[in-house]
């Protein structure tokens, strides 16, 4: 059976590289196994959900190269959740409760003071119909809790191996709020059933939810899917990433000029037994995904690792791939320019800076006027090609007796205004005789 996987963000902020890890693990398993990848927006919280975040999430996934086979929005599927909650009520698994937040808080504090676990005491289960009527007459509205069976929910986690949650140690979770809106748990299970999800791969912050959800699948008459809970990405100092802070959002990484495949490779390979390395495409990345080889500890996101990986992608980029992007940036110089500069780029966009050095204007730095005067005189006749630099510097060396750094650095400073950069043998023909002459004469050109 072809697997069906999903990524289920709530559209309450910009998705970050940690969310991309979840999205990619699901999308790549589906891709590799000929399955279906569903993007499900968990947008039942109308206050915090925003259409623009959902749109941006789709755009961010597209930037990574991921196009879901199906996109669904929970806000458009409310009847399914209503129907499921009616079934659970009829089966006695969903029961109404009237405690206020303050009452619950007070009870929790008493339990803690007595050294008891702060679990909901199920007081509402002993309310009579009359009690409920009286409470409703006072204007109280119920919220609804799922009655957990006091047993262990176990599963074979695709990342963590044999796993279990002892549901006897949990409070019965609230599934429906006082205002009739749903918390995440019920709609998620209802959709996982309705969409035929076979594998739920998500962050390990959901492990406890899985215990509850397994009971919910069963209470709704469905077989639970397979589960895998991957480690979470943290910052180097160990803090979790948050959608709200916008830190390391995919949009920011795109704006900062990172290659989408570098971001994808890092998001997937960091914190696994595979080395973080460049890949040719998403198919190759998919072939490296092994849920069982994801580490147990948190995966630390190191921006310098992304910088280094990004540079490796750019250095290896063939001209055919670079060409349309160079054209978009109005960078000329063709393949010669690309081959001259690519090893000097950390991000693709840095090519603009080197094109600026070719085209000018450049403020030359004249450090050794006698050398530069000789060099100007000895400039070879046209046409210039990749051999021009060597024949020119040979001639300058023969006349001045200078060699090595003493010869090359003043020439670089005069021609580019900089003390570092791509091979001058490749840059010189691109700079061309006119600009080279002017710069050697100390003019801004
Ligand atoms: N909306 C949930 C989240 O973003 C989905 C969790 C799940 O994959 O079930 O955490």
Image: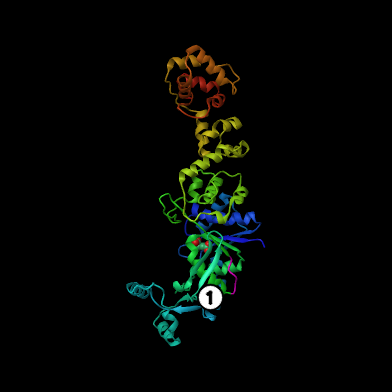
The percent position of residue 202, horizontal first and vertical second, equals 53, 60
Identify the secondary structure beneath mark 1. Answer: helix
- Whether residue 185 is visible to the viewer of this picture, yes or no, is no
Q: Name the residue rendered at 61%, 44% in the picture.
A: 280
> Within the magenta stretch, is there residue 338?
no
Is 202 placed above or below 384 here? below
> Within the magenta stretch, is there residue 223?
yes
Q: Is mark 1 within 8 Å of ligand 1?
A: no
| Figure colour scheme | rainbow
Q: What residue span does the magenta drawing correspond to?
A: 221-225
Q: Which residue is mark 1?
A: 85
Q: Based on the displayed image, in which of its 4 quarters is residue 277 positioned?
A: top right
Q: Residue furthest top?
A: 399
Query: Closest to the observer: 313 or 426?
Result: 313
- Secondary structure that dominates the magenta span: loop
Q: Where is the N terminus found, in terms of image quarters?
A: bottom right
Q: Name the residue rendered at 53%, 68% in the picture.
A: 154
The percent position of residue 214, horizontal first and vertical second, equals 54, 70
Is 384 placed above or below 399 here? below
Q: Name the residue rendered at 52%, 79% in the picture.
A: 89
Q: Residue furthest front?
A: 162
Q: Residue furthest left?
A: 113
The percent position of residue 382, horizontal first and vertical second, equals 59, 18
């Amino acid at each position: 059976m072809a697997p069906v996987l999903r990524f289920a963000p709530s559209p309450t902020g910009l998705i970050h590289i940690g969310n991309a890890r979840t999205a990619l693990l699901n999308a790549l398993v589906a891709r590799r196994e000929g399955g279906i990848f569903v993007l499900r927006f968990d947008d039942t919280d109308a206050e915090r959900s925003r259409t623009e975040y959902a749109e941006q999430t789709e755009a961010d996934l597209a930037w990574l190269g991921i196009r879901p086979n199906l996109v669904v929005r929970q806000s458009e599927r409310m009847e399914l959740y209503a129907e499921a909650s009616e079934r659970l009520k009829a089966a006695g698994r969903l029961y109404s409760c009237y405690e206020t937040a303050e009452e619950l808080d007070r009870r929790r504090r008493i339990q803690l003071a007595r050294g008891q676990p702060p679990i909901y005491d199920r007081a509402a289960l002993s309310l009579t119909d009359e009690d409920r009527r009286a409470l409703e007459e006072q204007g109280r509205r119920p919220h609804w809790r799922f009655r957990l069976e006091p047993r262990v929910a176990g599963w074979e986690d695709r990342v963590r191996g044999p796993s279990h949650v002892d549901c006897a140690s949990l409070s019965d979770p609230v599934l429906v709020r006082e205002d009739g809106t749903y918390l995440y748990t019920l709609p998620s299970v209802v959709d996982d059933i309705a969409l035929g999800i076979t594998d739920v791969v998500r962050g390990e912050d959901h492990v406890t939810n899985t215990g509850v959800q397994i009971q919910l699948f069963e209470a709704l008459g469905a077989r639970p899917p397979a589960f895998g809970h991957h480690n979470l990405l943290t910052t180097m100092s160990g803090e979790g990433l948050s959608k709200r802070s916008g830190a390391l959002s995919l949009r920011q990484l795109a704006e900062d000029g990172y290659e989408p495949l570098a971001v994808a490779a890092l998001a997937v390979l960091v914190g696994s037994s595979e080395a973080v390395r460049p890949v040719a495409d998403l198919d190759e990345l998919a072939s490296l995904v092994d849920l069982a080889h994801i580490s147990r500890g948190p995966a630390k996101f190191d921006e310098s690792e992304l910088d280094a990986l990004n540079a490796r992608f750019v250095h290896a980029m063939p001209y055919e791939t670079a060409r349309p992007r160079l054209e978009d940036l109005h960078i000329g110089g063709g393949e010669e320019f690309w081959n001259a500069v690519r090893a000097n780029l950390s991000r693709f966009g840095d090519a603009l800076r080197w094109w600026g050095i070719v085209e000018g204007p450049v403020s030359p730095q004249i450090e050794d006027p006698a050398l530069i005067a000789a060099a100007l005189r000895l400039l070879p006749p046209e046409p210039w090609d990749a051999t021009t630099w060597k024949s020119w510097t040979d001639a300058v060396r023969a006349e001045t007796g200078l060699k090595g750094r003493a010869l090359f650095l003043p020439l670089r400073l005069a021609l580019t205004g900089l003390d570092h950069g791509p091979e001058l043998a490749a840059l010189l023909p691109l700079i061309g005789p006119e600009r080279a002459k002017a710069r050697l004469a100390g003019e801004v050109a």
